Amino acid sequence: MNNFINAITEAVLPAKYHASSVFEMETLAEEHPYSAALQLLLAARLHEANDPSLKKQWQKTLLYFKDPLFLQYQFYAKNNEIRKTGEPAAHNSHEAEVVDHKIETTPLPAIIASGTPQQAPLPAASGTTDIPGIKLEPLDAAKADLLFTPYYTVDYFAAQGIKLNDDANASDRFGTQLKSFTSWLKEMRRLPDATTGIRLSSKGAAEIEKMAEQSLSGKNEETAAMAEVWAKQGNKDKAIEIYQKLSLQNPSKRAYFAAKIEHLKK
């Protein structure tokens, strides 16, 4: 019997197990059918007696434990048998010898002095070259005013990789259009610089402000009521014109104004 079974025996049946027979263990297991320890001890007793019913009992015992593989390993482990209950344990005849060791103490300042790290001399670098520093030159005032313009603003087609042949036939319509468009781009690029100094006259500015005020106040606003008035006066063209404007201003009512226009055209 190994140490695992002995430990369970001392916890469950410290005095009965070693003196009990197979029949007595079977009786105890039947009286306490829910005791996993008694089922295991019965299997151990059958194993000691080489009883043929061990296989059946062992399969039953495995159902009581969560880890059957670990139980099987512990059950069949070949450990030295421990002493039976009540048998005194053997004492070691050798006693531990107590040896007084003299501890040498070192003064604290000496420890601190000895513990101070000393820097080792660095090896002299051989074959090293000095890295030249960055030389900053003063910026020329004449170059500071230069403007860097993207190439596509100068010539769009050249920036896209399209080369125009100046010797192309004048009847080539596509080439003529490309040249015209390129010239227009160059002209538009020069246009802001040419119109920088142009300002509106005071009279023109006043007219623009007046038109903006009238637009915001709604004085020139044309309504469906005005169109109906024009229609009653017999001026259907003016009424249709107003309905068309209202249709553009109110897309959600486009079908309504279209019906009004169709009615006036009849």
Image: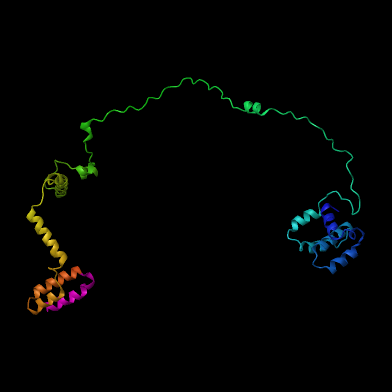
* Corner quadrant of residue 5: bottom right
Q: Would residue 132 appear left or right of 31 to someone viewing this image?
A: left
In the rendered image of this protein, does residue 213 appear above or below residue 86? below
* Residue 159 in view: yes
Q: Main secondary structure of the magenta part?
A: helix
In the rendered image of this protein, does residue 77 appear above or below residue 233? above
Q: Which residues are magenta?
A: 250-266
Residue at screen point 11% across, 58% down: 208
Residue at screen point 85% across, 55% down: 6
> Of residues 127 and 163, which is closer to you in this image?
127
x and y percent of residue 219 in the render?
Answer: 12, 68
The chosen color scheme is rainbow
x and y percent of residue 250 in the render?
Answer: 21, 70
Q: Would residue 68 appear left or right of 181 to someone viewing this image?
A: right
x and y percent of residue 129 in the render?
Answer: 43, 22
In the picture, which quadrant includes the C terminus? bottom left
Q: Would residue 68 appear left or right of 82 to someone viewing this image?
A: left
Residue 161 belongs to magenta span: no
In the rendered image of this protein, does residue 235 appear above or below residue 104? below
